[in-house]
Image: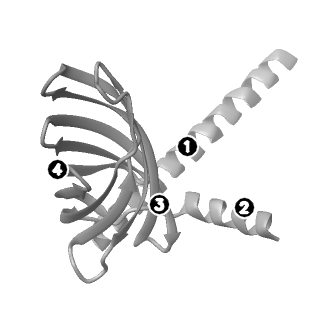
Amino acid sequence: MKIKLVIVLCLFSFSVVAQKYGTAIGPRIGESRFGISVKQRILPSFTAEAMTELQSDAYQFTILPKYHLPITGEGLNIFFGAGAHIGGLKEFGATYGYDLMGGIEWKIPALPLVIGADVKPAYHINHEDWFEFPATVSVHYVFSKETKAKRKKQRAKRKKRKERRERREERREKRQEWWNDFRNI
């Protein structure tokens, strides 16, 4: 029974657009870190996030593409992603490394705000701590959101693409028929 529920949820999640915003910016706050992040929707279920994080003895800039899966409807999502970072550490100089990220976010329906919580394990190179597992909370202000008009326009584009594919397939079939007739003469 549990496996069937997971399969149904997975199928549902791939057919629904995950996030209801285009561009959002806001603070990220963790135990000993503070930062700002900007999210930009790239595809219906993918965003790219650029983050800066400041600590008492370090700074870091991270780029992460993320994949969103809706939990209930389009407002509540889980997400995961992977990316890279560069930065500096007071006693070690320049650092870089790789990041993973997983979390949950909620787009508040009546307000232009997205509230999220995540963990971002990071593997560092040339750093005193080669691995860290920080958790942060973020609040993003939505600058551009998906409107009904944009969704309608996207549906119309998808419909036109589908019609073009169907016409191309019909032309291929006609050419194949002509070729078969020509060979049989």
Q: Mark 1 vs mark 2: give the one in front.
A: 2
Give the residue drawn at x 48%, y 74%: 73
Nearer-N-terminus badge (1/2): 2
Apparent side of residue 20 relative to residue 53 in the rendered image (left or right): right
**Label 3–label 1 contact, CB within 8 A:** no
Q: Mark 3 vs mark 4: give the one in front.
A: 4
Q: Which mark is residue 174?
A: none
C-alpha separation, residue under disc 3 versus residue under disc 1: 33 Å
Give the residue drawn at x 17%, y 42%: 52
**Label 3–label 4 contact, CB within 8 A:** no
C-alpha separation, residue under disc 3 versus residue under disc 2: 16 Å
C-alpha separation, residue under disc 2 versus residue under disc 4: 37 Å
Give the residue drawn at x 17%, y 58%: 27
For label 4, the crowd category at 10 Å Cα-Cα, with few meaning under 14, some 14 to 19 and many 20 or more, is some
Residue marked by disc 4: 35
| Quarter-of-image position of residue 83 | top left
Secondary-structure class at tag 1: helix
| Quarter-of-image position of residue 146 | bottom left
| Quarter-of-image position of residue 113 | bottom left
Secondary-structure class at tag 4: strand
Return the x and y of residue 43 as percentages of the image width and height. 39, 48
Return the x and y of residue 132 as percentages of the image width and height. 38, 39
Instruction: Pick out the residue farthest to the bottom.
Output: 110
Apparent side of residue 21 relative to residue 65 in the rendered image (left or right): left
Q: Is residue 147 above or below residue 172?
A: below
Residue marked by disc 2: 7
Secondary-structure class at tag 2: helix
Apparent side of residue 96 relative to residue 154 in the rendered image (left or right): left
Residue marked by disc 3: 78
Q: Mark 1 vs mark 4: give the one in front.
A: 4
Nearer-N-terminus badge (3/2): 2
Residue marked by disc 1: 165
